[in-house]
Image: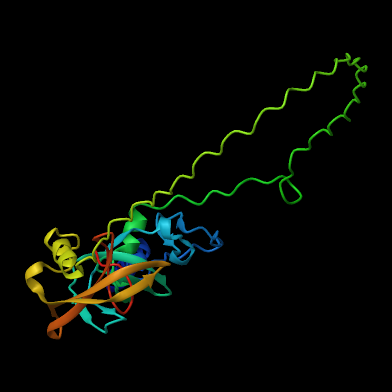
Amino acid sequence: MKFLLYFFGMAGAGYLGYTLEPGLRLQLTGNAAAPMGVAGSGSSVERMPDGAIKINLASLTPEQLPQRVLLKADAKVTDSSSGLEMIIKAGNRVKLVGVEGENVVISPGEGPFRGAVLITETDILQQIAANPPAPASIPATPPGGDSEEPKMDPAPPPVPESAPAPVPVPEVPAAPEPAATPDPMPAPPTEAVPAPAPAATGPTDVVTVMQDSIKAAQIKEFAFDQVLEWTATPDETVDGEVFQTGVASYKAETIFGVKTIQAKALVKGGKVQRWIWPKSGMDIK
C-alpha cells in the first residue's frame, strides 16, 4: 500500500514539474528550455512545441522593444552631470532606454537621470511574450550572391545630319552717311542721396525675457515662485549660433534635501529659444 502511495506521489510531482517548469523559467530568466533534438533558430521570439516562449532580448532592435516598463522593485537613477540621485518606487512605469546584458537601462522621463536594473525586476519579458514583435524582413536575393541590376540595351549611335544647303545672302546697298550733329549738352550732375540709416535697436533684457518664459510655462521643470535669482551672463555660441544667455537659480526638493539648481536660457530675437542644463547642455523640458 505504501509503495503505491509513493509511486503515485512521484508520478504527480513529475507531471507538475513538467507542466509548470517552462512557465516558471520564462518568468525568472526570460528563456524557455528547448526540447531535446530541437535547436534554437536564432529568432528573437520562439514558441516551443510545449507552448513555452523563448525570448532573446539581445537580438531585438530598439523599435521592437516596449517604450515603457513596469518596475517590480525600487530602482535608483542618477544624473551624471550633477551627481544627484533619486529612488523610483516599485509599481511605477519608466522609460526603457535600452538593454545591456542582464540589465535594462531606464529613465524616469526625458531628463538626464539614468539607472540600470535586472531584467527580471521589470515586466519587459511579459510584455514581449504577450505581444511578440514581428521578425525583421530580409530582401530576397537571387541564387549565387548579390542581386543583379537590370541590363539596359545600348543606345543606338547617333545618325549624322546632312549639312543644310547654303542660303544666298542678298546684297544690301550702302546707306548714306548721316549728317554731323552737334554734341548734346551734358546733363548737370546729380547729388547722391544717402540711404537712411537703420533704426538702432537696444539690447534685449535677458532677465525680463527669462521671467516671461517661465510665467508662460515654456518648461515644466520649475515654476516662477521657485526661482531665487535671475542673472544675465555673457553671450555664447551654441551649434554655430550666437545667443544671449542668462541663468535662473531655483530651489528644488532632492533626495539630499532642498538644493539650489541652475538652468540656463539661450535667448535670440527677444525670446528664449531653449532652456538647457549648464553642465551637460541637454534640453530642459
Residue under the point 15% across and 64% down: 214
Residue 285, above or below 87: above
The answer to whether residue 11 of the structure is visible from this angle is no
Residue under the point 21% across and 78% down: 262
Location of residue 171 in the rendering, given as x and y in whole percent from the top left corner:
89, 15
Location of residue 177 in the rendering, given as x and y in whole percent from the top left corner:
78, 22
Image quarter of residue 69:
bottom left
Residue 191, above or below 233: above
Q: Total of numbered circles in the picture?
A: 0
Residue under the point 63% across and 34% down: 183
Location of residue 192 in the rendering, given as x and y in whole percent from the top left corner:
43, 49
Task: State the quadrant of the C terminus.
Answer: bottom left
Residue 170, above or below 78: above
Task: State the quadrant of the N terminus.
Answer: bottom left
Q: Give 95 or 8, whichever is nearer the viewer.
A: 95
Location of residue 74 in the rendering, given as x and y in whole percent from the top left corner:
21, 76
